[in-house]
Image (cartoon, rainbow, N blue to C red):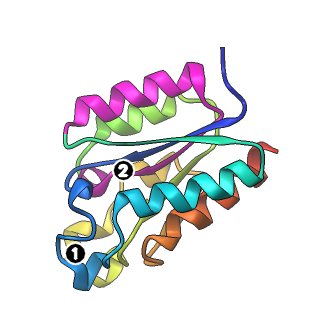
Amino acid sequence: MTDLRKVFILNGPNLNLLGKRQPEIYGHETLQDVEMACRQIASAAGHDIRLLQSNAEHQLIDWVHEARESASGIIINPAAFTHTSVAILDALNAFEGPVIEVHISNVHKRESFRHHSFVSGRADGIIIGCGVQGYELALQRILKIIN
């Protein structure tokens, strides 16, 4: 049964190092900071979040499958899997709720291989280059869609 009050926030490889890895690109905030900010926004709107991170593609796919039964929306930062994973795209295509894709950095100002996203073909919205504030913007948007 879908919990219409829950939004999954899924994070791909190396985002466990957020705040430590390349802060000149990704900033100093951590995933814990992201979770706290998003939890406040969701709570104020009567919703809940489940923020998860994995370096393993199959784990992200399993969480997307889980979201089919237990969430009304997905915010996803697939990180490097953005540019390589048809499998994540296929999993997202099986999810019926809204999907918002988030990237902390402006991928279009970086290496050319980062300019293509498989996930964008499924996303209902894409937030790029807004730092970790992009998660908050994505959550505000997804709450608007599901309400």
In this rendering, would 145 be left or right of 62? right
Mark 2 surroundings: few (<14), some (14-19) or many (≥20) residues within 10 A: some
Q: Main secondary structure of the magenta part?
A: helix
Give percent across and percent down for residue 146.
Answer: 76, 43
* Residue numbers of the magenta segment: 56-83
Residue at image x 26%, y 68%?
114
In this rendering, would 140 be left or right of 29? right
Image quarter of residue 55:
top left
Q: Amino acid at mark 2?
A: Phe
Q: Amino acid at mark 1?
A: Ser
Residue sitting nearer the eye, 76 or 30: 30
Circle 1 is placed at which residue position? Answer: 112
In this rendering, would 86 be left or right of 136? left
Give percent across and percent down for residue 2.
Answer: 66, 21
Circle 2 is placed at which residue position? Answer: 118
Estimate the spatial distance between the alpha carbons at disc 1 and disc 2, rounded to whole Å. Answer: 14 Å
